[in-house]
Amino acid sequence: MLILLLALWLIIKDESRFLATLVMACGLLSYFFLSIYHLSESSPLPSTFPLTWSNDYKINGQTLRGFATTTDGQKLYVVYTFSSEQEKKLYENTSLTGVTYLAKGELVEPSPAAHTYAFSMSDYLTSKGAIGIVEITNWSYVEKQTSFVTFLAERRYSIEKHIERTFPKSLVVEAQALLIGEKDQMDDELQRAYQKLGITHLFAISGLHVALMSWLFFEGLLRIGVRKELATVVLLILLPVYGVIAGGAPSVWRAVSVVELMMILRMIKLDLPMDDALAFSFIGFVLLEPGVIFQIGFQLSYLAAVSLVYSGTIFKQTKNELARSFCITLVCQLLVYPLLLYHFYELSLSSFIVNIMFVPLFSFVILPFNLVVFVLTYLPLPLADMLFIVYEPLRHLLTDMIFYMQGLPFQLWSPGKPAIWLSCVAMLSVLVSFYYLETRRYGKAIVILFIPALWIHLSPMLYSETKITFLNVGQGDSIVIELPFRKAVYVIDAGGVLRFEQEQWKKTDRPYEVGKQVVVPFLKGKGIRAIDIFIATHADADHVEGAEEVLQEIKMKEIHVTPGSLEQPVMRDLLKEAKKFKVPIKEKMQGTAWHIGEVGFYYLWPQDTFYEGNDDSLVLYMQQRGFTALFTGDLEQYGEQQLIKRYGHLIANLTLLKAGHHGSKTSSIESFVELLQPQLTIFSAGLQNRYGHPHEEVVQRFTSRNLATFTTGVDGTIEIRIRGNTTWSVSKIEKGLVQ
């Protein structure tokens, strides 16, 4: 749809007639790929089968993951678990690209996304053209294929290791990212700082990057006396080589293919407009790997390139280089902003200004320095070390400045994920505004841009329903309550992972974090920019371990905890982050109540300030006219008996119950279920969890009374919508099977 809008814009401008072919090719190829790939079922694997590794793989902790192909050309996502530290080191110290193994394993279904806004393994496999996941149980080495591609992969691997050996530790990630496109080792905090400033692309090998490297190499050949014709041929040969060594990202191959095509045609005295070269590159890319059209990097790369190619009239209106730099940044950011919001649910506002400074700095200072010093590290002289002595403290100073800048307020616009039709409206408004910018009608351009942006910003706050969402966080709890028109948002717990001690070599570089990878994407996808009250029911890791990750990304106005729980070790990280962001933490117990409009909230438990564990969970009762709900944390038998004794008249004949302690045998006792008779009960528990939650006997207590139940680990994220007096409905946002 976005491509069709772009085509319409170009036809109106009469910029390109070839783009019609591009649109037709994209539509037909996308439809063909979706039809064939999604409707066909992959054939079962034989008992043993050969696998040949590509260059797209990672070793992290105890696991090797990546893509390999079978003899019939099928692409698989392979998962192999190392049996020992020695075996892991063996695989770490060699390049696997081109290596063939005779494997035993089975195809497994990818786990669906935890919810609509979370990472989808299925979509990732589609974008990579893989037919599925295979878990290897055993394999044996067969051979290593010798080809030019494997030779280049080995050179890339050796460059990666050379940088690790010769560069200061603090500069390794930067050099690997800028020279070979490897940035997996980047610190999470630094990466987030770059994201907030909107300069993450500077650590990717972009079209500007390739153009600069090509120019430096070409001019270098001319300076040493190589004839222009020969230098052109050498560059034609080496550009694809660099594309492989640089990691082969979509932005790299886009730039390489366009430059190659235009240079070849000029050598045979044919001129090809840049837009047509870009179109040929696009079509060729999709023909070779249809799934790439779903990769976000691919979409952003071509869209940004199109914005630059067709905005020459706007750039000509600038009077100096600074104004031109701002215009280039403005045009690129405006054209991709609907896509960024659709995929990432937020947009860096500072990027419009920050890129003016950082793009030249990285392109003409940091990149050339890394290139020069990389060459010097191969010389026996200590020249590289001398340059590192000067550069490293300056680079640390720049990093400190980046951290300071990202900490300034109003860095991000986070309106949530717009509907696809609203994204198209936003894209259309950008294209129309470009027309007005070209004709110097700046006021109209601003108005045209502002109206859809305001619509996107306000749309999450225009619904009149109360929404209660039980997130699939695996073995844990996380519940989001949204009141009508976003009058308030409450979050009960934030999930977490129970960490167990393991050998150092088995530990992953980036441990799985429920708060960051499940809860935060949901809140951002919904356009929730602030949490009015975060409720930590009690001090268990599977309820609060993810809370500090949420606090780092989403504003919390206040935090409620059960009395005495703050002294527990698991609460330390939350306390630290709350202090950092100056969020008040309040201990609550029975008797506290508040109302927002016609919705009332009441804490029914605990009754004292002595914390003893599950039975001191904060219990929240909610009432909206005829709809009632009870959120019990990990309340067990004693707590439930006390609720019956003290509040039996209030909680009887309940509408919605969040079952205590994930459906454990120690909770949801007979008398409690008999009194409440909840129309719907939610068990928040992981799929096939080690505790056997919810227990079969407990589920039977509800089903024997014809009371409906859902389990997040089986049914995925569950949303309840309350309309009017007593009308309510339940739906599964997306079936997610988080372990």
Image: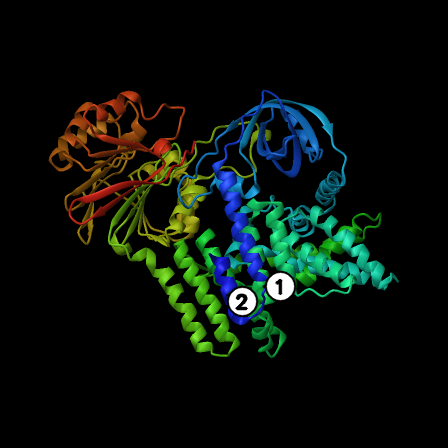
**SS type, badge 1:** helix
Give whichever of 269, 698 is nearer the camera: 269
Give whichever of 13, 715 is nearer the camera: 13
The amino acid on which the numbered mark 2 sits, given as a three-letter code, is Leu
Is residue 163 found left or right of 383 in the rendered image? left
Q: What residue does disc 2 label?
A: 10
How far apart marks 2 and 1 lie (CA) works out to 11 Å
Q: How many C-alpha atoms fall within 10 Å of the one at disc 1: few (<14), some, or many (≥20)?
A: some
Q: Where 518 sits versus 348, above or below?
A: above
Looking at the image, the residue that sits furthest to the left is 649
- The answer to whether residue 165 is seen in the rendering is yes
Earlier sequence position, callout 2 versus callout 1: 2
Write the residue at 57% across / 61% down. Answer: 19
Q: Are marks 2 and 1 in contact (CB under 8 Å)?
A: yes
Q: What residue does disc 1 label?
A: 275
Is residue 736 found left or right of 431 in the rendered image? left
Q: How is the image coloured?
A: rainbow
- Image quadrant of residue 544? top left
Write the residue at 26% across / 31% down. Answer: 709
Give whichever of 731, 473 is nearer the camera: 731
